[in-house]
Amino acid sequence: EVQLVESGGGLIQPGGSLRLSCAASGFIFSTYSMNWVRQAPGKGLEWVSYISSSSSVIYYADSVKGRFTISRDNAKNSLYLQMHSLRDEDTALYYCTRDSSGFSYDYWGQGTLVTVSS
Amino acid sequence: SFEVTQPPSVSVSPGQTASIPCSGDKLRHKYVCWYKQKPGQSPVLVIYQNDKRPSGIPERFSGFNSGTTATLTISETQTMDEAEYYCQAWDSSSVVFGGGTKLTVL
C-alpha cells in the first residue's frame, strides 16, 4: 500500500525557518517524481515545488522561489522541503504528492500544518 | 502567466448529470486532471490526462478537453459526489490549479 506521511509542521514566527519531511513507503520511491502542494485554511490548492526522481530537475512556484528548497533522499525514501523567510501567507496544510501520468498526482499524504504567526 | 478558471459552485439534482468546466486559453496542448476533495480529507485524483480514470474511480466520472475548456462530467450524480473539485494543468515549468468548484447535490 502506497503511503506518504508528512511531518515537521508547526507554529513558527514570521521570518523563521522550518523543514518538512515526507516518508514514502509501498512503492519504489527512487523511480517517481514528487511534489509539495499546499492549501491555506479554507482556500484552494496551490502547487509549491517539483523534484524529479533523480533530483536533476527542480521547479518552484514563483511565490516560494528563493525561499524554499526541495530535496530528496532516495536511500531513505524521503522527500523534504526546507522553508526560510516564512511569511504569514505561507500558513497552510502542506501535502506531499506522488507524480503520475501527465503530471497528475495519484497519491497524497494527509498533510502537515504550518502556521506562520507572531 | 498561465491560469485556469472554474466556477465557484455547481448544483445538481441526484441522478442527474453534473458538468464542471475548467477554462484556459492554453489548454489545447496540455493534459488536464481533476481532483475531488471532501472536507477534512486529502484530494483524490479522479481524472488524469484529460479523460483517463484511475483504478477505483467509478465510470460515472469522465473528462474531456476541447482545447479551451476542460470539463469534468459526473453522470447519475449521487450525494456522495458532493465535494470540492479542482482542475489542474502543467505549463512548462509550473503547475496550475483552478480555484475549485463546490458541487452541491440537492
Image: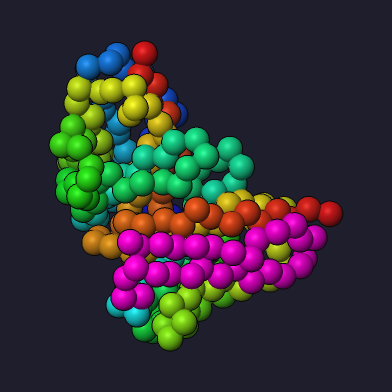
- Image quadrant containing the C terminus of chain B: top left
Q: x and y percent of residue B35 in the render?
A: 35, 44
Report x, y in % for residue A66. 60, 73
Rendered location of residue A68, percent (x, y) = 60, 71
Relative placement, left or right, of A71 versus B35 is right
Q: Is residue A14 magenta?
A: yes
Q: Which residue is found at the position 28% from the left and 23% from the top?
A: B78
In this rendering, does residue B50 appear at all?
no
The quadrant of the picture occupied by the N terminus of chain B is bottom left
Residue A96 among those drawn in magenta: no
Q: Which residues are the magenta region? A: A1-29
Q: Nearer the viewer, residue A114 or B21?
A: A114
Q: Is residue A1 above or below residue A33?
A: above
Q: Residue at x 75, y 57 (%)?
A: A11
The location of residue A3, given as percent across then percent down, is: 40, 62
A95, above or below B80, in the image: below
Q: Quadrant of residue A4?
A: bottom left
Q: Is residue A116 visible?
A: yes
Left or right, residue A82 beside residue A55: right
Q: Residue at x 38, y 27 (%)?
A: B82
Say how the picture is coloured: rainbow
